[in-house]
């Protein structure tokens, strides 16, 4: 090779010249706008595909029926009277904080405020069919009042039931005796504690309504902290004997805030510390380590700002991108730095030009691997992938052009290279590397066969199982979920109910839908598809009935003097007519009210908001379906799927965590080909364009195949399951794992098969890069979100397998299979002295 030809190969490619400082200044504009637009979202359902019925149903439930300002406090004590006393104290202490709490309900409102129950009773009567409501006029006819009151007096004198005596003492006319079809919806004046207390009385709950608007997770966190302090202070000396739990939206959002802070501190901080430690372990130099950490922080902040510009709102779960990005972005700096140390006589532009193909193809496959997550059916994971892809592209640019210049200021000029410099193999003439011993080759192939055989034996016992539930979306350790599970266990909810939301653009439309749904559910209960169901039909207004009942309500309301006179004549005190008076008042209000009549007092609203919701355009009703308790989860899922197929399609949503997991997993499974196919195509294309040799392409694919077997074997051994989030590890392992074989084989080419030189220059850098990538993904194992933790674990094992195989096994495979035109071949009797002489003399001979 001529001197001019060798010098030409060492000159920087024009396309790799520094873009200029103005380019980075230009990036400041979108970064500033992105930071101004950036917002964080703590809602887990925003991570899910919105076009699924189960997801839409859960969103509607969260929006309309799970009161955004309602906190549920559980109280658990050794004795029932102690639990009642503790619940009362906590509720009274919270009520005293009028700046903090709007209402705290520790027992059924109809027991604490029985006077407010009359409005709901009157409303339920007013919603009855006209013939039923008109029957009241017959019951309260003047000629029947005396007989009715005498019967009530006789019952009071002879009854042994405390409940019946209590009822008749404030309801002598029997107006609380609703029709049988409606009675279940009305509060019982002596019962109803099962909604607030366990059967043994040692577990109780308190409903707390926040006074301020809790718009963000930070608001929830601050408010909940004050509530906890107030509640514990109210218990005084008995605080150690009382166990308090907190659940509901404020508690969940507060956990999200704490989880995000933990994830960022653990994942990002831990990954940065591991990067610094590994870099120091490899190079023991302070300046390049600090400069690397500075650029990584700049890349991370810039990516977050650009993400804010693109997305506006970033879900806190997607913040897992930060640790992943740190682990990947460091690769481009480390590879450049290792090349600079291995070739001290080359300028930075020459190193940049030599390493550019490896960087380019590695970045392309990594970026694509994360971008294809947008086709997986999970918007939240797609957002995370887009953020990582954006960050990797930014990292490649910054590390290529900005990492080395401050560290080697004297090597920024391309002319600093000497034609005779001893930089074998980078871009110069071929060398004669020292042959690999036969024993080393045999050891590597024996080890390769052993790994292959071991993984196959493990997988003969079965592949990793699949978790089709929605558990991957839940926090790993959540006191709020633990409290919710305790509430379900203590309040006789053996299985989590399934929500049925019925919607319509008018009250009449919802009524029609509820009647259709009731017929289907009644048939499903008869066919044992479900155990039972509850629909709010008795509580739902009937405008057609109300319109006909208005004149009747007026007639009843005007009978007040007659009822008073008859009760007094029969010996009833005026106080015994308090409930009757309020019923008559409500009917007179209903008569005067135009349009749909709803009850308005606090007790009625507390009940109605659990099952009824209205917006300016739509009305919604919430029903509950109880699965068969004795069945397995999979059997109930099959039954609920059949039920869902029988329900009307329009404005009806059957939803719950069981159905949510099944629906999302089905979507992810159906979309896997959209994720894997382009990734496989890109990997093959990248390998072809990088190598253009069938043997080298085959070796890279072999690395991927063997590392895939290792991943499956590890998952099987440690008991990991595939779930709807970590399935996306497949394209990530493909896209990021193939980089190591590309880097290593291109290095073997550059050094013309010199394994030691390739290892010293690139192999050591790949060990550091692989370590940081494993740290980035592995740090997600401590994520507060179960799905993100499993995704990090699977990716860390897959990428680690790729890295180790590419560094320690692939070079020997390449030497035996893919190397061409090399002399001498591997020999057992190779002479090190001759090899060393050839290695030092050949470059001079070729240059001459």
Image: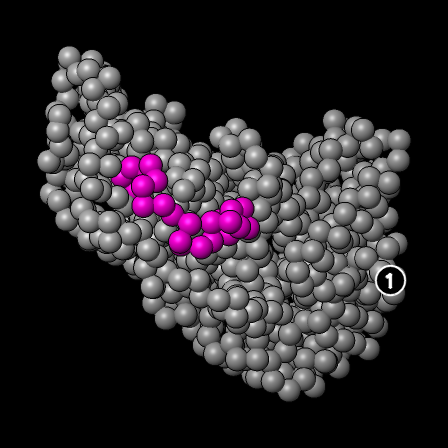
Say whether residue 412 is magenta: yes
- Majority SS type along the magenta span: loop
Picture residue at 60% right of the left edge, 80% below the top = 596
Question: Picture quarter containing residue 787?
Answer: top left
Residue 492 vertical placement versus 664 (above, below): above
Colour mapping used in the image: one colour
Relative to the observer, which residue lies in front, 628 or 817?
A: 817
Relative to the observer, which residue lies in front, 532 or 665?
A: 665
Q: Mark 1: give few (<14), some (14-19) or many (20+) Cα within 10 Å.
A: few
Which span is picked out in magenta?
404-426
Picture residue at 57% right of the left edge, 46% below the top = 291
The residue under label 1 is 575
Residue 119 vertical placement versus 786 (above, below): below
Question: Picture quarter containing residue 128?
Answer: bottom right
Question: Picture quarter containing residue 428?
Answer: top left
Query: How far across and how far down the image is residue 71, in percent?
Result: 69, 52
Whether residue 339 appears in this view of the structure is yes
Q: Is the C terminus in the top left, top right, bottom left or bottom right quadrant?
A: top left
Whether residue 800 appears in this view of the structure is no
Picture residue at 24% right of the left edge, 24% below the top = 837
Q: Is residue 351 left or right of residue 448?
A: right
Q: Is residue 809 left or right of residue 828?
A: right
Relative to the observer, which residue lies in front, 57 or 197?
A: 57
Say whether residue 673 is magenta: no
Per the image, label 1 sits on a secondary structure element best described as helix
Query: How far across and how far down the image is residue 617, in percent?
Result: 52, 80
Q: Is residue 195 left or right of residue 840?
A: right
Relative to the observer, which residue lies in front, 773 or 193?
A: 773
Q: Is residue 139 left or right of residue 653?
A: right
Picture residue at 74% right of the left edge, 58% below the top = 210
Query: How far across and how far down the image is residue 757, in percent?
Result: 31, 31
Residue 787 vertical placement versus 576 (above, below): above
């Amino acid at each position: 090779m001529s001197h001019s030809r060798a010098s030409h190969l060492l000159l920087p490619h024009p396309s790799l010249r520094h873009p200029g400082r103005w380019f980075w200044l230009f990036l400041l504009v979108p970064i500033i706008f992105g930071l101004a637009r950036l917002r964080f979202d703590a809602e887990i359902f925003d991570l899910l595909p919105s076009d699924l019925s189960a997801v839409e149903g859960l969103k509607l439930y969260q929006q309309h029926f799970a009161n955004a300002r309602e906190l549920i406090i559980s109280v658990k004590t050794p004795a029932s009277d102690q639990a009642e006393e503790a619940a009362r104290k906590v509720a009274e202490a919270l009520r005293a904080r009028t700046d903090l709490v709007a209402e705290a309900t520790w027992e059924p409102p109809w027991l604490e405020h029985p006077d407010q129950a009359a409005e709901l009773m009157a409303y339920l009567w007013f919603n009855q069919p006209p013939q039923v409501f008109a029957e009241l006029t017959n019951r309260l006819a003047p000629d029947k009042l005396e007989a009715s009151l005498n019967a009530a007096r006789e019952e009071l004198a002879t009854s042994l039931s405390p409940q019946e005596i209590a009822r008749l003492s404030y309801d002598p006319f029997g107006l609380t005796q609703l029709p049988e079809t409606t009675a279940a919806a009305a509060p019982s004046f002596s019962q109803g504690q099962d909604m607030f207390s366990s059967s043994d009385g040692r577990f109780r709950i308190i409903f707390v309504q926040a006074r301020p608007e809790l718009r963000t997770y930070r608001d929830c966190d601050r408010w909940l902290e004050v509530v906890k302090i107030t509640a514990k202070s109210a218990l005084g000396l008995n605080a150690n004997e009382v166990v308090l739990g907190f659940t509901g939206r404020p508690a969940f959002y507060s956990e999200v805030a704490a989880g995000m802070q933990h994830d960022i501190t653990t994942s990002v901080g831990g990954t940065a510390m591991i990067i610094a430690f590994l870099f120091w372990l490899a190079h023991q130099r302070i300046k390049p380590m600090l400069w690397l950490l500075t650029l990584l922080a700049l890349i991370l902040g810039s990516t977050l700002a650009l993400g804010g510009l693109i997305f506006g709102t970033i879900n806190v779960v997607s913040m897992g991108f930060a640790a992943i990005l740190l682990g990947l972005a460091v690769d481009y700096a480390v590879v450049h730095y290792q090349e600079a140390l291995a070739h001290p006589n080359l300028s930075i532009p020459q190193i940049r030009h030599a390493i550019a193909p490896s960087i380019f193809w590695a970045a392309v496959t990594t970026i694509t691997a994360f971008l294809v997550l947008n086709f997986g059916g999970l918007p939240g994971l797609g957002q995370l992938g887009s953020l990582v892809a954006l960050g990797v592209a930014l990292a490649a640019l910054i590390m290529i052009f900005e990492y080395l210049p401050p560290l080697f200021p004297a090597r920024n000029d391309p002319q600093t290279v000497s034609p005779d410099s001893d930089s074998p193999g980078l871009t110069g003439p071929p060398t004669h590397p020292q042959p690999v011993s036969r024993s080393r080759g045999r050891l590597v192939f024996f080890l390769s066969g052993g790994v292959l055989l071991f993984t196959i034996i493990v997988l003969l016992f079965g592949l990793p199982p699949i978790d089709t539930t929605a558990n991957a979306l839940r926090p790993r350790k959540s006191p709020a979920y633990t409290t919710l599970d305790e509430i379900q266990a203590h309040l006789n909810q053996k299985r989590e109910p399934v929500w049925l939301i019925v919607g319509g653009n008018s009250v009449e439309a919802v009524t029609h839908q509820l009647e259709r749904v009731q017929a289907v559910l009644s048939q499903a209960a008869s066919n044992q598809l479900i155990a039972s169901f509850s629909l709010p039909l008795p509580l739902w207004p009937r405008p057609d009935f109300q319109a006909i009942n208005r004149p009747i309500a007026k007639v009843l309301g005007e009978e007040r003097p007659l009822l008073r006179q008859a009760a007094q004549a029969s010996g009833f005190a005026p106080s015994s007519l308090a409930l009757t008076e309020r019923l008559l008042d409500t009917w007179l209000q209903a008569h005067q009210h135009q349009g749909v009549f709803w009850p308005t007092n606090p007790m009625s609203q507390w009940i109605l908001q659990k099952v009824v919701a209205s917006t300016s355009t739509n009305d919604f009703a919430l029903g509950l379906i109880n699965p068969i308790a004795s069945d397995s989860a999979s059997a109930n899922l099959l039954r609920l799927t059949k039920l869902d197929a029988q329900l009307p399609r329009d404005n009806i949503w059957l939803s719950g965590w069981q159905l949510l997991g099944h629906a999302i997993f089905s979507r992810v499974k159906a979309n896997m080909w959209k994720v894997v196919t382009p990734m496989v195509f890109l990997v093959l294309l990248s390998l072809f364009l990088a190598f253009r040799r069938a043997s080298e392409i085959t070796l890279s694919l072999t690395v991927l195949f063997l590392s895939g077997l290792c991943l499956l074997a590890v998952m099987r051994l440690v008991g990991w399951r595939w779930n709807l989030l970590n399935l996306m590890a497949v394209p990530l392992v493909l896209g990021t794992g193939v980089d190591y074989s590309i880097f290593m084989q291109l290095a073997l080419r550059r050094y013309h098969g010199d394994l030691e030189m390739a290892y010293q220059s690139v192999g050591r850098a790949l060990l550091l890069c692989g370590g940081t990538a494993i740290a980035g993904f592995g740090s997600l194992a401590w994520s507060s979100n179960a799905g993100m933790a499993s995704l990090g674990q699977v990716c860390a094992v897959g990428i680690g397998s790729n890295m180790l195989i590419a560094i320690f096994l692939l070079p020997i495979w390449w030497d035996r299979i893919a190397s061409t035109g090399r002399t001498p071949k591997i020999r057992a009797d190779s002479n090190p002295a001759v090899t060393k002489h050839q290695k030092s003399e050949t470059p001079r001979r070729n240059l001459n």
